[in-house]
Amino acid sequence: MRSFFIILLSILLSANPLFACTMEPSVWRTVETQDFAGAPGVFALSDAMYQLREKFHTELSACNLPVLPLTFVGAFDGDEQNIMASPTRAVLEQSVELIWRDAAILPEAELVRSAQDVDALMKAAEKAGKKSYTAMIIVSGARSSYINQIDLNFWLYQLYRCVLREELKVFLRVADAEGTAIFIDEITVSPTIIVDPIISPVGGYIIRFEKNTACPLLLDFGPLVEGGEHVLRQNDAFRQPSPTPPLPEFQLGPVTD
């Protein structure tokens, strides 16, 4: 049976290679959705940290303040501002390592126990000295959505779409050696990854990868080259059209664990 499909595909491709390799507009049907709240992911927190770092550097430059390394002296979860749980702390450490490599996080036993403890924040700033700024971070509103779709408009192949969206709110406060706040900001991010794998009679492979973040990225097949080969390329002209893809499945509804 596999040999029959290969022979049939070869005949059709040789008869009209351009039509066979050019995908028609997709007609998507959602086959599975999952939407739940929980611990934040590195994908969303890294995007938030990147945007906050850019804003931080811009504001310090505008105020003629030196850009010094950060020391996180407080890390909290949720609107209740509880001490950050170990899983979330691990995600924070990975995000800082990826985005803010000159930053450090104090050991858990040395972190400030309350976001409202001004005296503890002042003492932490004095201890850090003038070679580092101190930072307090609050992470809340973590939510993830997964969507699996199938293309109803296919010809000798089946095209799937896998979508991952994370949502997160991050509050960041940075203080100098005297404990004076020099940067305060809160940001909400909702980065999205879209992957389109194709399943054909001769195998499966990814034909498109799209990352919608502060640094958007699109990889897709370019035009056919000599010999009838597709080449996965980076689309430099790609621009993120909107923070959230216009998919009705992404409308916020009841949360299920």
Image (cartoon, rainbow, N blue to C red):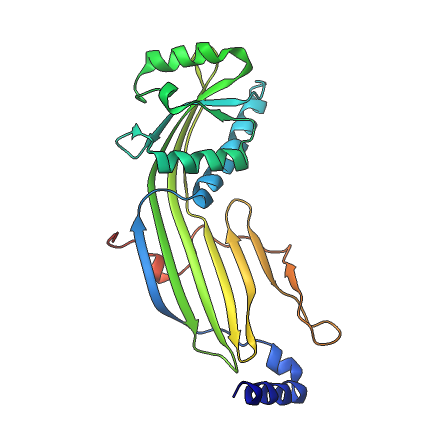
Q: Residue at x 42, y 47 (%)?
A: 190
Left or right: residue 134 compared with residue 36: right
Q: Is residue 132 above or below residue 46?
A: above
Residue 117's place in the image compared with 244, above or below, is above
Residue in view at x 63 percent, y 58 percent: 235
* Residue 16 visible in the shown view: yes
Give the x, y percent position of residue 155: 52, 82
Report which quarter residue 30 is drawn in. bottom left
The part of the image, by quadrant, that contains residue 54 is: top right
Q: Position of residue 6 (x, y in %)?
A: 59, 85
Q: State whether residue 222 is above or below residue 110.
A: below
Look at 55% across and 63% down and name the residue there: 208
In the rendered image, residue 35, in percent from the top left (x then y), is placed at 31, 55
- Nearer-the-camera pick, 29 or 184: 29
Q: Position of residue 209 (x, y in %)?
A: 54, 59
Q: Is 150 displayed left or right of 67 in the figure?
A: left
